[in-house]
Every structure is written in C-alpha cells, then in structure tokens.
C-alpha cells in the first residue's frame, strides 16, 4: 500500500511540495492561524482584563445593530467605494497614456515616475495633505493670495471629502499599474482591424479596448477597495470627527477600550462586507464580458 | 486630426495628474528648509536648522536603529521565503499548488489592520511580549508576496538547459542550484531585498499594533505628529527618508533590469 502510494506521487510533486513548504508553513502559522484565532475571539466576551470563553453572538449583534457601528461601517464602505471609483476613473487615462502614447523605450521611466511619490513616508505624506488642505494651508493661502477668496475655506479639511482625496492620492499608483498591464497586452492589430472596418474611435474603445482592459480594471478595483477599508491613519489625521472610519473603532477596541472581542467582530464584519462587495464586482464583470462576446 | 487633439488633451491631463501626485513630495523639502516653526506659506527663508534637530536627537537615533534592524531582518527572511515559493511556483507542479501559492500571496490584498490585529491577538494569548521580533514577523508576512512576485519573474526567465547541462556534467542538484541558478537570479534577489527593506522601513499600521517598548521610525513619527513644535524636524526627517528610499529604489530597479537582461530575452518584465 505504502509503496504503491509513494509510486503514485511523482518526484516532481515531492520536490515542489518540499520547496513551497517553508513559505507555506510561515503563512499558515502567522496568517491563517492568527485569523482563526480572531474568529474564535470574536465569539467570546471580555470585561476589563478578564476573558469569558463561552460562545456568544453578542459582539456581532452589537456590531450589526448599534447605530454607532452601523454608521461607521456604512461610511467606511461608502468612502472605500468612492476612493475605488475615483482611482480607477482618474487612473485609466494615465494608464492609457503610458500604454499607447509613450514610446516603448520610455515606459519603464514613466512607471517609475508614477510610483516615486508612493515612497515618501506614508505618515508624512498624509500629514502634508493636512498642510495642503488646512486653514492656513497651501490651497487657502494661494486662493487668498490671488484674491479669489477673503476668508480661508474651512470645508476642505476635516471631513470625508478630505479622507477620499488623501486616500485617492495614496492608492492611485496601485490602480494605474494593473490597468496599464492589461492595456499594454492588447494586440494593436485588433485596434487597426476595427479602424479598417470603419469603427469610430469611440466605438473602437467601447468594443475592443474596454473589454480587454477589464481584467486590469477588476484587479485595480480589488487592490484598492479591500485594503482601503482598513486605513485608520488617514481618517484620524484629515477626517475630523465626522470622517472617522471603522478601522479607527477597531483600533480603539483593541487598544484603549480593551474590548478585543468586539474589535475582532467589527474587523471580521468589515472583511465580510468588503469580500461580498468584491464578489459582486467580479460577478458583474463576468456578466459584462460574456455579454460582450 | 481629431486623434491628435485627443492626445493633446491627454497630455494636459497627465500634467495635472503629475502635479497632484507630486504635490506632497514637492512641499516636503520646501518646508524642511523653511526658516519658520510653522508649516505654512509664505516661506520665510532658507535654513539647515531642522536637519540639525534630526542629527542630535537620541530617541530618533534609537528608532532609526530599531527600524534598520527590523528592515534588514525582514528583507533577508522575506527574500529567503520568496526564493522557496518562487522556485516551487515556476519550476514544479504539485497538488494544491494554486491554494498554497494563493495563501502566500493573500497579504498583498488583505487590509493591514487585519494582519496587525490577528497577530496581536495570538501574541497576547500565548503570553508572549511585543518586541521588534513581533514586528519583523508581521513585516515578513506582508513582504513575502512582493519578493515572491519579483523572484517569480526572475526564475521564470531562467534558461533551464543551463541547469540540465550542469547536472549532466555531474553536479548535484544542490551545487547546481548554488553555482548556476542563484548567480543567474542574483539581480532578482537584490531587487527583492531592496524592495522588502523599503516597504518595512515605512510600514506603520502593522508596526503600531505589534510594537513593544522599542519604537520603529514610523511609530516614532506618529508619536511626534501630536507636537506642533516637532513638525519642521519631521519634514527634514521625511526629506532624508525620501532621498534614501529613492536611492534604494533606483538600485532595485537597476538590478531588476539586469535580471531581465541576464535572461537573454529582449522583452523586459515590469515589476508590477
């Protein structure tokens, strides 16, 4: 039995499994197991420092019914969706420009140019947006300087719009790169064929470029949408009281409020919601592509 | 004709976009050299004094040392794990490959707060204490997917006949790997080390959850943001960090291109 089993596994599979195992085990122990622990924790309760290990749904009931958490969750999803939509819409023409207009020799430089601002310290970058948008900030200063306004505008900092703007800035490179990769792969002869057949540039774009760019757009959507929900630094620095997001609440529960089980339930609920929305995106994309064939 | 006009508009758009993208990076050095304790316009004059506050600041030096320890360890471990995963992923087929590679790559799209929170829960439940070690463990987790992606591209382009020739000539698999394969993918390895180092050096969200008494540089910066009088110094620090990151990235890009060229292929693979 044992020997026939061994014979049925080819040596290549054994080598492959042996090679992947250190990395896989690392991810299993430090990612899968901790997430399992968080799931378990979310069904427990805690008052002060004492943990009660009896199964309960109380944390989830709280997370889904109490108005504070509901409001934060809805706002966070709204902000993440807005950031995703803006980054894809703003990023698409840039990706198009690099893929179709920049000469091939120059493309690496352009891609590098897009990613450089991303390497300014994350915290300092967010802080600088606070400086740009602030009461005595760059925008107000310039507008007063050229005489367009007399009093500084107060509505541009410490609100959800400022959070969306700052997050868009942070995530634009991540939206541009996958869209660029998809656009760059498009066979140019297809576009020429459409042109020869008399398609207008707009029709050509709708019928050929857009469907072929869809995998890149979907990748951009997922890459931006899911992590954005977990940012707590941007809302804290530029969001003001009405711009806080669910991640700020999760952080508070784990640190100051000492209610890790509720924090765990909030984190998992947020993950659940973004996963469901992402699956809806993927499903819609598949329908769109099938209808286009 | 209309196509030409289209692309003119596109160039204007790209220009505006670059201005938006670079706004913080342009302001950073302006304020770092500005002779005023308040971060606002108009600029007051040129000074080096904020860089001087960076030079003699004991807790900043300590945070820098901690960050270097964390970033170097992260780079080495993540690249090692990346070599294993990339080699397995490009050279072999085995049962469960998609699922296993998938799990390794998941941290790329997971919100960092989830990783920070879940590792914190485990560390506290096991009664371990938070230290630089816990930050390293978290950073290796998020850097390994990037290393795997870069190294995957390097291994992918490898000419397999070189390895086969070495084995035909009587070398063992291990010496072949060490003497033939590794030198060929070395530029990829260096690119991976530099990228992981740079990511770790700037990572805040996970570090904030997993930090003990010893702060890393971003955790230190976060603490200082509360004090208005410290902000100009932070601008100087940010400028230094930007320059260092850029130098590292230029190096990484250089080695990545050399890796692509080493494969003897005309086509160059991009990082993303």
Image (cartoon, helix red, strand yellow):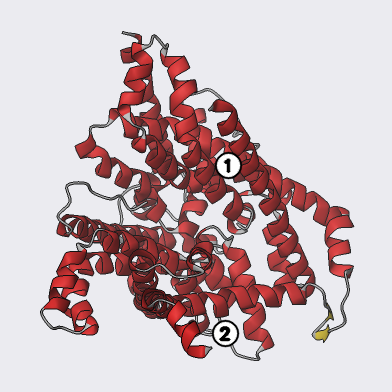
Expressed as whole percent of the image width and height from the top left, the position of residue A108 reads 26, 44
Q: Which of the two residues, B101 or B31, is positioned nearer the viewer here? A: B101
| Number of the label disc, if any, that sits on residue A84 | 1
Instruction: Specify whether residue A259 is in view.
Output: no
Q: Residue at the location (56% across, 71% down)?
A: B208
- Residue B7, how many percent across, how many down? 34, 20
> Mark 2: few, some, or many residues within 10 Å (few <14, many ≥20)?
some
Most distant residue in the left direction: B169
Pointer 1 indicates a residue of which chain? A
CB of mark 1 within 8 Å of CB of mark 2?
no
The residue that appears at 53% across and 63% down in the rendered structure is B106
Where A162 falls versus A40 (above or below)? above
**Which disc, if any, is residue A127?**
none
Q: Which residue is mark 2?
A: B130
Dot 1, crowdedness within 10 Å: few (<14), some or many (≥20)?
Answer: many
Q: Is residue A76 above or below residue A51?
A: above
Residue A37 position by quadrant? bottom right
Could you tell me how far apart the alpha carbons at marks 1 and 2 are, in whole angstroms?
Answer: 34 Å
């Amino acid at each position: 039995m044992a020997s026939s089993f061994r014979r049925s596994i080819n040596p290549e599979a054994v080598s492959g499994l042996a090679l992947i195992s250190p990395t896989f085990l690392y991810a299993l122990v430090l990612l899968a197991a901790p997430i399992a622990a968080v799931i378990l924790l979310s069904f427990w309760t805690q008052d002060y420092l004492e943990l009660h290990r009896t199964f309960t749904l109380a944390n989830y009931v709280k997370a889904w019914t109490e108005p504070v958490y509901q409001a934060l969750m809805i706002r966070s999803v709204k902000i993440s969706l807005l950031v995703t939509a803006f980054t894809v819409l703003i990023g698409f023409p840039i990706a198009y420009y690099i893929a179709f207009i920049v000469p091939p020799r120059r493309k690496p430089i352009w891609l590098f140019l897009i990613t450089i601002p991303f390497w300014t310290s994350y915290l300092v970058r967010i802080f600088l947006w606070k400086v740009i948008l602030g009461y005595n900030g760059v925008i107000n200063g310039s507008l007063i300087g050229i005489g367009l306004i007399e009093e500084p505008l107060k509505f541009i900092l410490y609100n959800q719009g400022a959070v969306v703007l700052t997050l868009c800035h942070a995530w634009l490179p991540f939206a541009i790169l996958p869209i660029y990769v998809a656009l760059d792969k498009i066979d140019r002869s297809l576009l020429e064929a459409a042109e020869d057949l008399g398609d207008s540039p707009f029709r050509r774009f709708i019928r050929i470029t857009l469907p072929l760019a869809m995998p890149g757009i979907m990748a951009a959507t997922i890459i931006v949408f899911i992590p954005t929900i977990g940012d707590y630094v941007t809302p804290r620095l530029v969001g003001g009281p009405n711009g806080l997001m669910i991640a700020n609440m999760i952080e508070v529960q784990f640190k100051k409020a000492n209610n890790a089980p509720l924090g765990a339930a909030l984190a998992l609920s947020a993950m659940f919601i973004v996963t469901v929305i992402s699956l809806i995106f993927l499903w819609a994309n598949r329908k769109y592509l099938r209808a286009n064939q | 004709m209309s196509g030409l006009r289209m692309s003119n508009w596109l160039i204007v758009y790209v220009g505006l976009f670059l201005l938006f993208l670079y706004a913080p990076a342009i302001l950073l050095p302006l304020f770092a050299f500005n002779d005023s304790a308040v971060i606002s316009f108009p600029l007051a004059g040129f000074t080096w004094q904020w860089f001087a506050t960076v030079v003699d600041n004991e807790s900043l030096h300590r945070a820098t040392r901690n960050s270097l320890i964390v970033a170097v360890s992260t780079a080495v471990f993540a690249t090692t794990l990346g070599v294993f995963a990339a080699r397995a992923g490009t050279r072999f087929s085995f049962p469960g490959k998609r699922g296993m590679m998938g799990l390794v790559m998941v941290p790329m799209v997971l919100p960092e707060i989830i990783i920070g929170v879940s590792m914190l829960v485990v560390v506290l439940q096991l009664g371990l204490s938070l230290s630089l070690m816990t930050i390293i463990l978290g950073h290796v987790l998020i850097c390994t997917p990037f290393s795997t992606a870069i190294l995957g591209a390097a291994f992918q382009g490898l000419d397999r006949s070189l390895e086969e020739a070495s084995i035909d000539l009587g070398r063992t698999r291990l010496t072949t790997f060490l003497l033939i394969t590794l030198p060929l993918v070395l530029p990829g390895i260096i690119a991976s080390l530099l990228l992981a180092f740079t990511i770790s050096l700037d990572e805040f969200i996970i570090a904030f959850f997993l930090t003990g008494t010893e702060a890393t540089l971003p955790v230190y910066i976060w603490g200082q943001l509360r004090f208005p009088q410290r902000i100009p110094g932070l601008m100087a620090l940010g400028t230094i960090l930007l320059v260092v990151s850029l130098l590292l990235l230029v190096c990484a890009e250089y080695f990545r291109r050399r890796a692509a060229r080493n494969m003897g292929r005309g086509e160059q693979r991009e990082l993303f």
